[in-house]
């Protein structure tokens, strides 16, 4: 019951946090078989939240043992289907403790439950579009369960790819891909002959399938160049530079195609375009500018200003009803963890608590001083979250418009430099198109 309550409340928060959400491959998920989801782990605390919300079946999680420090946390995590998994840093007896954890996992699979395992084990401090080398834990649990029950369970592994446009940013985009199942029965004979060889083979197959579900840049040195290509093309899943008319799924497919072209390109074949892109973006940075398809035009001011003035009361309402609780949630989130990779998930989790409490306080205060009819208060409640989102978008638009106006104003006397940048940009976008973008 508590799990369903968490799924409902966190589900609302996730749908508010992300502007667009696309789920792909849900038809690959069996409804009545024991499953293991093996997922990438790009954003620490956010990853189990989004998978718990969007999985049709209830999930059972394994998490780092050090978060189960207090009695209250242990109670919450148990109700949320979370179990501790131990690392060497947790003590010399950690491996013995993990044997108990794995036995619990085997029993869950026997009962046809769904385990969620993050195959990489850790999250990078900086958001990167790639799969890290997989740990052995997923393979041990999967093959260990089947071995314990004589390969009669019928456990399937589904590789889950979590793709964020940028998990650190509010109102970003999310794509979750579910692969076709991997049947552990195919590894039975090899496992009975040689355990480690079966695990290595399964590890390799999971890695291949997982890379198919996410944007994976094989060479880490190409990560910056890849993001630059997304910015220039405006067709991919870069969070800030994209054509709003293109659907998120099409942006995903474009990005995946570009990734494949980059990963399959011969070594050094892209050195020239990478150097051009490096110079172009360095010049933008030195000039305090952002990439633009047209550096000279800031956009029509009159319609924009009219719209901003007309909607200013909505902005103020959204600001008053949301700023304080969100600020408190963010402040407390930073106190709890000093690692930025956790912040988006903890910000969202604390906001789920802070916002309803603040809304209730506002309603009670308003009712005390200005008694009104119930329908008006219900309307008031329904408008708080949408107006908060509107206030966030309003602020971003005003900030972007001012920056664009200042940029154009500062460039009036730099005609040659702007023409050179526009020429460089045109050449770069043409070369990206040749890559099959």
Image: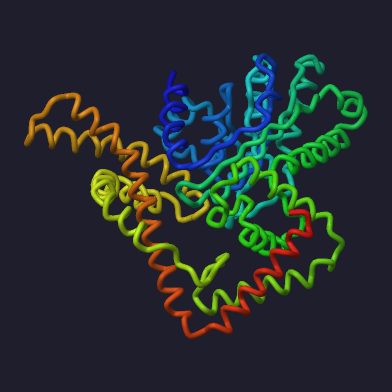
Q: Nearer the viewer, residue 276 or 98?
A: 276
> Residue 183: image x %, image y %?
80, 24
Q: Which residue is drawn at 7% across and 34% down?
A: 370
Front residue of this view, candidates 177 and 291: 291
Residue at image point 48% right, 80% down: 411
- In the rendered image of this protein, does residue 264 appear above or below residue 201? below
Please indicate, yes or no, whether residue 110 appears anywhere in the rendered image. yes
Q: Position of residue 192 (x, y in %)?
A: 89, 25
In terms of image quadrants, where is residue 146? Answer: top right
Locate residue 360 relative to residue 84 in the image: left or right. Answer: left
Task: Give the colour scheme of this rendering.
Answer: rainbow
Q: In which quarter of the image is the N terminus?
A: top left
Say which of 100 and 138 sits in front.
Answer: 138
Task: Tally the marks.
Answer: 0
Residue 429's x, y, as percent? 69, 64
Q: In the rendered image of this protein, does residue 363 appear above or below residue 310?
A: above
Task: Specify the quadrant of the image occupied by residue 436.
Answer: bottom right
Toward which corner of the image does residue 139 lie, by quadrant? top right
In this rendered view, identify the residue nearer to me: 81 or 380: 380
> At 75% across and 16% down in the image, what residue appears?
153
Q: Quadrant of the C terminus?
A: bottom right
Q: Is residue 318 left or right of residue 242?
A: left
In this view, 116 is above or below 427: above
Residue 57, horizontal then vertical, whole percent: 59, 21
Q: Can residue 131 be seen in this view?
A: no
- Look at 56% across and 31% down and name the residue there: 83
């Amino acid at each position: 019951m508590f799990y369903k309550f968490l799924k409902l409340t966190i589900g609302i928060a996730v749908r508010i946090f992300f502007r667009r959400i696309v789920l792909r491959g849900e038809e690959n998920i069996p409804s009545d078989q024991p499953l293991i989801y093996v997922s990438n782990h790009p954003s620490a605390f956010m990853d189990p939240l989004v998978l718990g919300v969007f999985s049709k079946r209830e999930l059972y999680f394994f998490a780092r043992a050090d978060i189960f420090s207090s009695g209250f946390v242990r109670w919450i995590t148990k109700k949320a289907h979370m179990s501790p998994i131990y690392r060497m840093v947790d003590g010399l007896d950690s491996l013995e403790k993990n044997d108990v954890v794995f036995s619990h996992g085997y029993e869950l699979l026997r009962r046809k439950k769904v385990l969620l395992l993050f195959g990489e084990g850790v999250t990078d401090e900086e958001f990167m579009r790639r799969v890290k080398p997989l740990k052995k834990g997923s393979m041990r649990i999967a093959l260990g369960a089947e071995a314990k029950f004589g390969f009669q369970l019928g456990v399937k592994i589904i590789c889950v790819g979590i793709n964020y446009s940028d998990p650190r940013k509010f109102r970003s985009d999310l794509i979750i891909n579910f692969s076709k199942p991997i049947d552990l029965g195919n590894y039975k004979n090899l496992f009975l002959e040689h355990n480690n060889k079966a695990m290595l083979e399964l590890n390799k197959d999971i890695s291949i399938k997982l890379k198919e579900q996410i944007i994976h840049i094989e060479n880490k040195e190409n990560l910056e160049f890849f993001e630059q290509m997304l910015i220039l093309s405006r067709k991919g899943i870069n969070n800030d530079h994209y054509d709003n008319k293109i659907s998120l799924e099409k942006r995903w497919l474009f990005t995946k195609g570009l990734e494949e072209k980059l990963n399959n390109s011969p070594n050094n074949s892209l050195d020239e375009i990478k150097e051009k892109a490096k110079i172009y973006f360095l010049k933008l940075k030195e000039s305090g500018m952002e990439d633009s398809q047209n550096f000279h035009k800031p956009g029509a001011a009159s319609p924009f200003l009219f719209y901003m003035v007309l909607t200013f009361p909505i902005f103020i309402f959204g600001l008053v009803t949301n700023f304080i609780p969100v600020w408190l949630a963010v402040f407390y989130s930073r106190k709890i963890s000093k690692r930025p990779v956790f912040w988006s998930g903890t910000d969202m989790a604390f906001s789920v608590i802070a916002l309803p409490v603040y809304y209730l306080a506002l309603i009670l205060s308003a009712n005390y001083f200005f008694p009104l009819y119930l329908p008006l208060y219900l309307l008031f409640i329904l408008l708080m979250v949408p107006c908060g989102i509107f206030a966030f978008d309003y602020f971003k638009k005003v900030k972007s418009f001012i920056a664009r106006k200042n940029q154009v104003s500062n460039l009036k006397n730099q005609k040659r430099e702007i023409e050179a940048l526009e020429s460089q940009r045109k050449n770069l976008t043409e070369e990206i198109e040749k890559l099959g973008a």
